[in-house]
Image (cartoon, rainbow, N blue to C red):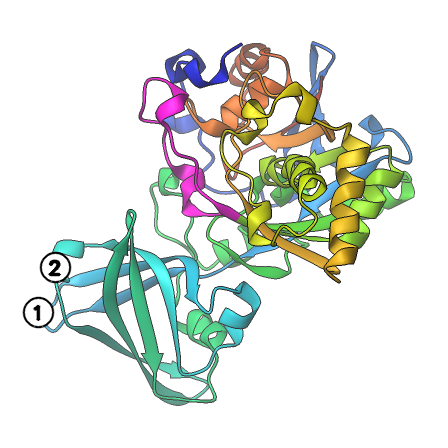
Amino acid sequence: MDTRHIHISDYNYPLPDERIAKFPLAERDHSKLLVYRHGEVSEDTFMNLPSYLPEGALMVFNNTKVIQARLHFRKETGALIEVFLLEPAQPTDYELMFQTQGQCAWLCMVGNLKKWKEGTLRRTIDVKGRAVTITATRGHQVGTSHWVDFGWDAADVSFAEILETMGELPIPPYLNRETQESDKTTYQTVYSKIKGSVAAPTAGLHFTERVLQALDAHGIDREELTLHVGAGTFKPVKSEEIADHEMHTEYVSVKRSTIEKIIRHDCQAIAVGTTSVRTLESLYYMGLKAAADPEMSEAGLHVGQWEPYDIAEGERLDTKSALQALLQWMVRHDLDVLHSSTQIIIAPGYDYKIVSKLVTNFHQPQSTLLLLVSAFVNGDWRRIYDYALAHDFRFLSYGDSSLLIP
């Protein structure tokens, strides 16, 4: 099938507002679990997930942590300006960014932009008992976002401390409510570690220490990688055909030991969430690039949106060979951790290379995430969603989840 000519209107379904979970359940692992196995649909409680998985399988989690990315400034005129951090600009490395002291720059979305034509915004906050003044100066436009320079008058205060004090957690827009104190806990996975996302990898929100221990007891091998979820994950597909939809770039980091472990598991993994899927599947295409050019730079391994569909049959490798080429490339460049980026779009017509089973929530109508699910279940997404709608499943970020075994 020609993936580019898919009509997004074919991936629509009725989602009444009352089916969107506004808050999570008090106990995460008591959420409902839809189980799709080889075309058969049933339901259970998330706590029982391990019993559906084969002993000895590899399960891969995205350990990204959501940052308090919404910053509010008030102009002297009284106008409220929201600055939403999208990705680090200076320095570009996430880890260095949060340690930065005194100044930094981000690419941002700006709310109420027309009221901030020029000038510097200021806000004074209390950081550990001392007054610190933060400034924001708008720079040039980069695509649909804006370069914003931040400065603050306390050389020993890190940008991470500033966000902890003045930032707000950016819960999804479709919740139609203000961020609450409880979201700081409930909108993070229990295994979140690496700061950088502006949206949670929501399939992971159902896991508790109890479930993780049950997975261990069941002989499931657990592994983590990092994909920082961008605001583009909520970007609706507005074009009629998906050929005209531009996927957002997201930044990934994967340890060499993780790739070695995937190879040991016959290049098969159970992915927790669509972000883990995009990272795992991107590794194959990065491996093809590494095989073709061992001198390729880290940035050069970036996976473009349509690359998986444009590679000639003769240029493809089996999955193991591609991952081994990526490993050899990392050894050659003396890297223990791969830092790169992906723009991959996974839609019907895509051939999955690594992900064999998927834990995921229920996604918005006409979204790229629904396309990914449809590709995974060979087009059978509607039966899954009809069942969920008919059986009181809760939808989207704080909703229930599914285990998909095609």
Q: Local crowd at mark 1 within 10 Å, few (<14), some, or many (≥20)?
A: few
Q: State the image quarter where residue 322 is shown.
A: top right
- Rendered view: 264 above or below 238: below
- Camera-side residue of 292 and 108: 292
Residue 111 in view in this figure: yes
The mark lying in front, picked from 1 and 2, is 2
Q: Is residue 153 left or right of residue 95?
A: left
Looking at the image, is mark 1 or mark 2 earlier in the sequence? 1
Q: Secondary structure at mark 1?
A: loop
- Rendered view: 404 above or below 278: above
State the residue lying farthest toward the left: 77
* Residue that label 1 marks: 77
**Residue 325 in the image: x percent, y percent?**
77, 42
In the image, the segment drawn in magenta is 228-250
Q: Secondary structure at mark 2?
A: helix
Residue 16 in view in this figure: no
Name the mark on residue 115: 2
- Rendered view: 79 above or below 248: below
Q: Any magenta on residue 386? A: no
- Camera-side residue of 85 and 179: 85
Residue lying at 73% horizontally and 42% vertically, measured from the top left: 60
**Residue 185 in the image: x percent, y percent?**
56, 57
Q: Local crowd at mark 2 within 10 Å, few (<14), some, or many (≥20)?
A: few
Q: Label the magenta part by its dominant secondary structure.
A: loop
CA separation, marks 1 and 2? 9 Å
Q: State the image quarter where residue 349 is shown.
A: top right
